[in-house]
Image (cartoon, coloured by chain):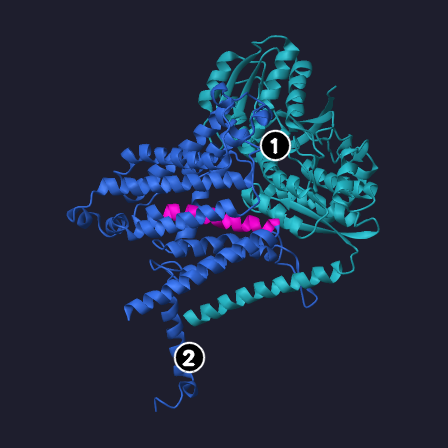
Chain colours: A cyan, B blue
Amino acid sequence: MKKILAVLLCMTLSVGLLAGCGSKAATTGTAAADDVIKIGVFEPLTGGSAAGGELEVEGIKLANQMHPEVLGKKVELIIVDNKSDKAESATAVSRLIDQGVVSIIGSWGSGYSIAAGDVIKKAEITAVGTSCTNMMVTKGNDWYFRVCFIDPFQGKIMANYAFTRLGAKTAAIIQEVSNDYSVGLASYFKDEFIRLTGDANSIVEIANYNTGDSDFSGILTNVKAKNPDVIFAPGNFTESAQVVKQGKKLGITAPFIGGDTWETGEFIDVGGADVEGAVFSTFLFDEQAPLNDKAAKFIEEYKKVYPDKTIAAVTALGYDSYIFTLDAIERAGSTDPVAIQKAMASTAGFEGITGTFDITADGDADKDIAAIKEVKNGEFVFKETITLK
Amino acid sequence: MKKQYDKKRVVLNLILIAASVALLIYANENMSFYSKRIINLCAVYAIMGLSMNLINGFTGMFSLGSAGFMAIGAYAVAIFTVPVDVRAEVFYLQPMWPLIANIHIGFLPAMILGGFLSAIAAFLIGFPVLRLRGDYLAIATLGFSEIIRIAFTNLQTVTNGPLGIKYIPSFDEIWWPVGVAIVTTVFMFLLIKSTYGRAFKAIREDEIAAEAMGINLFKHKMLSFVISGFMAGMGGALMAGILGTIDPKQFLFTLTYNFLLIIVLGGMGSISGTIISSVIVTAGLEWLRIADEPMIMFGYHIPMFRPGFRMVVFSILLMAIVLFFSKGLMGTKELSWELLGNWYKRQRARFIKKDPSLKGGGSK
């Protein structure tokens, strides 16, 4: 018995070894001709954030199929998993750099991008963020760019929505205190809402909860007592859905509004009928109303591969980040990292499928439009766009 | 006879030390950033494994607080080594607590401070907790590690809360982590060989018997716990120095399981086993990335090889290792020249038995 196991173990190991040789042979075989441009992708493909990473990789792969060439050379994607872990992200990116990629795309989750940013900055190679919205991803790092909007913008958008569209004079905030995204959004919402109403006391309550909590009746009772016009509750989709659900049970009538993380099937699965009417801001992408021809083409191609799936906004952002990288390489005219960095930094009027944008001094996309979506009949329905000046 | 044997061992040890120093210098000069990072991570995991093995393997207490101690060390480095002029940028939601906002120290003092803070935390938590045994101790230490994490999440003006701290001056060189790992290993060997180490082992084998022999149970358990806390703090500090950014979510209790995996795999109560398995787990998992890449073998694209597959392969290998070595790779043994020599002799004997022609004419 032990012998059989030993043999099996040896076989697994040798297959692994063979695999190493096999794949190396394959890459060197093509790279030898020097006609391949390698673009690295690091995304969470296992672990807690795997669902998000998978969606983005879908978009990047599809973009690669649709636009397989740049500068007359074939583009090869090297996809590595960051295990939804910060230390692993930095290692994964070092590996990509070691394999000679010319630019890097990723990642879902700002924490992973920030951890990788340090390596990217030292190696002086460009990186394009897909949906990492935390300010610190690009700040102080000339080599990191991104195609999505940032947390302050989204907080401001929702404050504007609450003030102008809902006519709210008071608001309560329920934030997931262990989540940088939630805390960031809540903080910018607060500042903007106070600025708009001109009343320092317009935020009547700030309630905290932790990731993984399941009973929110205590904080919701407090919120209800303050009787706000609107409740801003950005956070992880499961907990947020519970917050809305339990709030409705307690008889809170004020509308619940949130951020882009709510646009996940689980939000409706958990919340059921109670999340009907919940409104949130998200990346500007709607498969019913494509922004331009490129978007229409992308939707068409996507539906060929995945006929039954609705396209997530992050998938579209994955597509945009790939096209943005290709565009910069094209304009740089070479694969020299410094040239690509210059091309990316000077991007103006880039027409992506999630909106047209310039790159700011920090390396962010200056998107000034966000989509507002609502949950209606168990689906996410596009409501309107809000432009922030 | 014995003297001669010792001489041989000294020579072998010296050769080994010289070879490893040469190898490290070579690695630091010639290896890519990626390989050096893996070496650094191996070193940190080895330190964390040793710290956990001291309590779990040598003293026989089941503690799961490593992640918490690590967080203390990591935050000591993060808070005090970030340059003062970029602190406003890091603490962009709420400014840093004015009392510490202008204190800046170098990496070495910060790392030692991290170790000491961690040891102090271990000392304080040890008083109530070390009265517990077995699973209860595990639950209490696990709770402590979560408390630390949640405290760091909420201390917005000190730790920047969930946003984490960026701009920690990081290093690419392997000297800090590897140096500390070597010092820790040597220290552990000396500690385990000393009277204290023997007392720890006695406690592990049988607490009542140990107490009957005059060993002060609480004192020794506390000593083991505090030293382990100090090491974990140093490990955390090095982790912060390698990554350059940390946030509380990194120190979730699941982090502790990585170290638990290392000590179980290497052998509870074996220093060399811990080192070997930390290298296997860290470098091996990196090496298995080939399973994540698309593979073409004999012109055929094998569909199994896709991102995430390496975790499946890794799990299978772990199960196989646990099946063959139920006490871990090394059990409670240490890697020594005698062990290697005996192994070599055994293998040779086996070989000769199978193939009599190699035995020569003498035995007939």
Name the residue at the left extreme. Answer: B212
Q: Position of residue A76 (x, y in %)?
A: 73, 52
Q: Which secondary structure type mostly characterizes the magenta part of the structure?
A: helix
Badge 2 amino acid: Phe
Query: Toward the viewer: B279 or B143?
Result: B279
Badge 1 is on which residue?
A261
Secondary structure beneath disc 1? helix
State whether residue A52 is above or below residue B277: above
Magenta-colored span: B33-53
Badge 1 amino acid: Thr
Q: Residues within 10 Å of mark 2 (few under 14, many from 20)?
A: few
Q: Position of residue A72 (x, y in %)?
A: 84, 51
Q: Are marks 1 and 2 on the same chain?
A: no
Decide if residue A172 is on the left or right side of residue B218: right
State whether residue B264 is above or below residue A105: below
The quadrant in which residue B165 appears is: top right
Query: Label 1, label 2: how many angstroms apart (C-alpha)?
Result: 63 Å
Decide if residue B267 is on the left or right side of residue A367: left
Secondary structure beneath disc 2? helix
Where, quadrant-wise, is the N terminus of chain A in this rendering? Answer: bottom left
Query: Toward the viewer: B29 or B141?
Result: B29
Where, quadrant-wise, is the C terminus of chain A in this rendering? Answer: top right
- Residue at x 38%, y 51% (from the top left corner): B186
Badge 2 is on which residue?
B351
Q: Evaluate whether residue A100 shows in this view.
A: yes
Specify the subunit that label 2 lies on: B
Q: Residues within 10 Å of mark 1 (few under 14, many from 20)?
A: some
Q: Position of residue B208 (x, y in %)?
A: 18, 48
Query: Toward the viewer: B215 or A26?
Result: B215
Q: Position of residue B245 (x, y in %)?
A: 55, 36
Q: Is residue A24 magenta?
A: no
